[in-house]
């Protein structure tokens, strides 16, 4: 649980690494708010196309074979954004980061479900879901201060270093669940059959979650810039959002 929590926290930091420093990004790259919105949209776009395929892969292959490459993509994408001299490369870096982050967030719940049962499952899931709020609090309260000293790209280096630490801990500590150790792989057809049997209630729940996430993401993406333009310092605006 500790190892996958670190991975989830890395995903959350990657997600929220742009909103706290949007005013500085706009000033440095001389881009519009629509272009900033694209940086956030491209982060989530891989999830639209990869959610079901990654779910299939998580049933067929061991979790470490998906989590480790996903964390590497977060590291690569964040470093690419930090080093990019142009908006186009920043966009590409965010897209790569999104692939790794969304893949990580899809696989982690399956790991918890395989490791914990009964009351332990409820508690472990509850702890796991504190990762995104905690990551948001850290991002909005730490990254603006770092950006004020070292520039907005420091937020991306923070993500890359944390993801690297999470990857090292994961590779050293994490072990496969007993079920995965007994069976090396699973049939992809079983996963497809499960998708086809999903009832309308599950699809409705997915739609509700999509709309909720969209609204929250839109608000948090631009609230810092809104507050800064209304007289707040970037650190105070980050504190208000975090």
Image: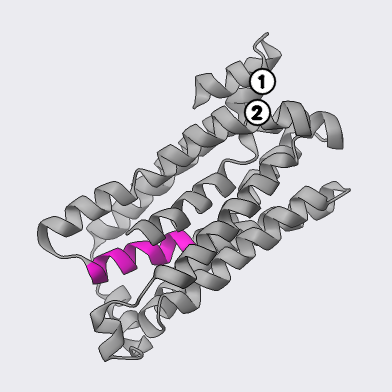
Up/down of 13 relative to 228, above or below: below
- Vertical side of 216 occupied by 12: above or below: below
Residue at 24 percent across and 82 percent down: it is 179
Whether residue 1 is visible here, answered yes or no, is yes
Is 9 placed left or right of 208 in the picture? right
Image: magenta residue range: 104-115
Q: What residue is rendered at 33% in x and 80% in y? A: 191
Horizontal side of 173 relative to 123 (left or right) equals right
Q: Up-down: is 97 above or below 110?
A: above
Nearest the viewer among 173 and 189 is: 173
* Residue 33, percent from left and from top: 73, 32
Q: Position of residue 144 (x, y in %)?
A: 65, 28
Residue at the spot of label 1? 234
Q: Position of residue 219 (x, y in %)?
A: 53, 30
Please report contact status of discs 1 and 2: CB closer than 8 Å, yes or no: yes
Query: Which residue carries the number 2 mark?
Result: 144
Identify the element where label 1 is drawn.
helix
Q: How many residues crowd around disc 1 within 10 Å: few (fewer than 14), some, or many (20 or more)?
A: many
Can residue 48 be seen in this snapshot? no
Residue at the image point whose x is 26% and y is 90% from the top: 182
Residue at image x 59%, y 19%? 237
Q: Is residue 125 left or right of residue 131?
A: left
Number of residue marks:
2
Q: Find residue 187 and report its image quarter.
A: bottom left
Does residue 104 lie above or below 235 as drawn?
A: below
Taking the magenta stretch, the answer to whether it contains residue 35 is: no
**Direction front: furthest residue:** 172
Of the two numbered discs 1 and 2 on the same chain, state the one appearing first in sequence.
2
Of helix, strand and loop, which mostly describes the magenta segment? Answer: helix
**Viewer-side residue, 98 vs 210:** 98
């Amino acid at each position: 649980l500790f190892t996958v929590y670190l991975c989830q926290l890395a995903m959350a930091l990657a997600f929220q690494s742009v909103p706290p420093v949007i005013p500085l990004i706009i000033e440095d790259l001389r881009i519009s708010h629509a272009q900033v919105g694209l940086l956030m949209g491209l982060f989530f776009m891989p999830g639209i196309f990869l959610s079901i395929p990654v779910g299939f892969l998580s049933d067929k292959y061991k979790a470490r074979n998906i989590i480790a490459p996903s964390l590497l993509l977060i590291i690569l994408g964040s470093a690419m954004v930090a080093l990019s001299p142009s908006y186009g490369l920043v966009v590409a870096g965010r897209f790569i980061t999104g692939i790794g982050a969304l893949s990580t967030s899809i696989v982690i719940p399956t790991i918890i479900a395989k490791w914990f049962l009964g009351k332990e499952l409820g508690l472990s899931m509850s702890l796991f879901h504190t990762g995104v709020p905690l990551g948001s609090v850290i991002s909005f309260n730490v990254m603006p201060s770092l950006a004020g000293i070292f520039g907005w790209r420091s937020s991306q280096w923070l993500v890359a270093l944390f993801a690297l630490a999470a990857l090292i801990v994961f590779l050293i500590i994490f072990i496969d669940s007993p079920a995965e150790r007994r069976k090396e792989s699973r049939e992809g057809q079983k996963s497809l059959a499960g998708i086809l049997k999903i009832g309308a209630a599950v699809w409705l729940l997915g739609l509700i979650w999509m709309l909720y996430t969209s609204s929250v993401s839109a608000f948090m993406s631009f609230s810092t810039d809104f507050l800064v333009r209304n007289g707040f310092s970037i650190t105070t605006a980050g504190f208000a959002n975090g």
